[in-house]
Amino acid sequence: MKARKTYDPKFRAKVALEAVRGKLTLGEICKHYNIHHSVVIRWKNELLEKLPLLFMKEADSNLNEAIEKNEELYKEIGKLQMEVKYLKKNFFTNIK
């Protein structure tokens, strides 16, 4: 099996910026850097998604941290609820 290529973050940023600038077509960028077009599109989308984070204020980042913590807690609650259901089901079936 062929190992996946890994790219340096600086290289990824450079290629993504070229894609965002739009001076070259996607095909030209892919040919120049010898990268598949789906990778360039993914890097471009990732850049555009994360770019606003550079300009966030401290309060906004605290809000994002709270949202992430909230999501983790909801996942944990769901996991615990599933465990309780499983234990109730197995406990009551073993008693009979």
Image (spheres, grey):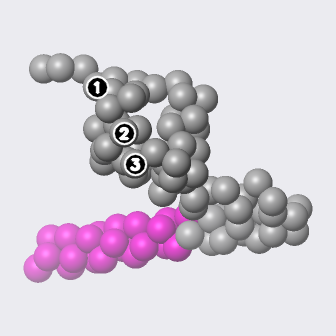
Q: Residue 4 shows which numbered tag?
A: 1
Looking at the rendered structure, the kind of residue marked 3 is Thr
**Residue 6 visible here:** yes
CB under 8 Å between discs 1 and 3:
no
Looking at the rendered structure, the kind of residue marked 2 is Glu
Nearer the observer: mark 2 or 1; the answer is 2
CB under 8 Å between discs 3 and 2:
yes
User: Counting residues from the N terminus, which is met first, the one under dot 2 or under dot 1?
Assistant: 1
Vertical position of residue 31 compared to residue 50: above or below: above
Residue 42 x %, y %? 41, 50
At 50% across and 37% down in the image, what residue appears? 15
Vertical position of residue 90 compared to residue 40: above or below: below
Q: Name the image quarter holding residue 1.
A: top left
Give the spatial CA distance, label 2 vs label 1: 22 Å
Tell me the residue that label 2 is attached to.
28
Give yes or no for residue 67 being in the magenta stretch.
no
At 32% across and 43% down in the image, what residue appears? 27
Q: Name the image quarter holding residue 11.
A: top right
**Residue 95 visible here:** no
Looking at the rendered structure, the kind of residue marked 1 is Arg
Left or right of 22? Residue 26 is: left
Q: Is mark 2 on a helix, strand or loop?
A: helix
At 46% across and 45% down in the image, what residue appears? 24
Q: What stretch is highlighted in magenta?
A: 72-96
Disc 2 packing (10 Å; few <14; some 14–19; many ≥20): few
Q: Residue 25 shows which numbered tag?
A: 3
Residue 60 x %, y %? 81, 69
Residue 49 x %, y %? 57, 61
User: Counting residues from the N terminus, which is met first, the one under dot 1 or under dot 3?
Assistant: 1
Q: What element carries label 1?
A: loop
Nearer the observer: mark 1 or 3; the answer is 3
